[in-house]
Image (spheres, rainbow, N blue to C red):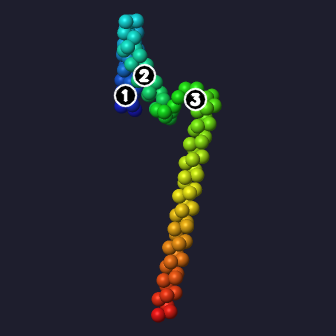
């Protein structure tokens, strides 16, 4: 328990130090502040499971949604074609093997 308490205390100290750093940043440190905000945004996004490719408001862009829908349909169609092609090839091979087996039996 003491170990957990110490770890929590250290975490709280680190948070306090970071808060103090943010308070020290002046308006002239906008680049540093923006960098810290970006790091914080990435941490939160990772914690929430938001992908890197997420675009804010993209769900309301009908053109993007239509393009995304078409891409998904193309992928599905490609997979179905591949599956049918594989099934056809399997049947062809089975037919060939059966024909060869019949030929061997006739000898």
* Mark earlier in primary sequence (1, 2): 1
In the rendered view, tell whether residue 52 sits above or below residue 88. above
Residue holding disc 1? 7
Residue holding disc 2? 38
Are there few (<14), some (14-19), or many (20+) residues within 10 Å of tag 1? few
Q: Are marks 1 and 3 in contact (CB under 8 Å)?
A: no
The quarter of the picture where residue 24 lies is top left
Q: Position of residue 64 (x, y in %)?
A: 58, 33
- Residue beneath the point at 55% across and 54% down: 79
Q: Is residue 70 left or right of residue 51?
A: right
Secondary structure type for disc 3: helix
In the rendered view, tell whether residue 101 sits above or below residue 35. below
Q: Quadrant of the N terminus?
A: top left
Q: Position of residue 12 (x, y in %)?
A: 40, 21
- Residue beneath the point at 57% across and 56% down: 80
Are there few (<14), some (14-19), or many (20+) residues within 10 Å of tag 3? few
Secondary structure type for disc 1: helix
- Residue beneath the point at 36% across and 31% down: 3
* Mark earlier in primary sequence (1, 3): 1
Point out which mark residue 58 bears.
Answer: 3
């Amino acid at each position: 328990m003491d170990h957990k308490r110490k770890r929590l205390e250290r975490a709280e100290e680190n948070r306090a130090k970071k808060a103090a750093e943010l308070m020290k940043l002046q308006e002239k440190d906008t680049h540093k502040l923006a960098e810290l905000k970006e790091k914080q945004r990435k941490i939160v996004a990772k914690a929430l499971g938001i992908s890197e490719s997420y675009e804010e408001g993209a769900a309301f862009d009908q053109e993007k949604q239509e393009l995304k829908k078409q891409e998904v349909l193309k992928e599905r169609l490609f997979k179905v074609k591949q599956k049918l092609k594989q099934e056809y090839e399997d049947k062809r091979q089975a037919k060939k093997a059966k024909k060869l087996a019949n030929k061997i039996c006739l000898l």
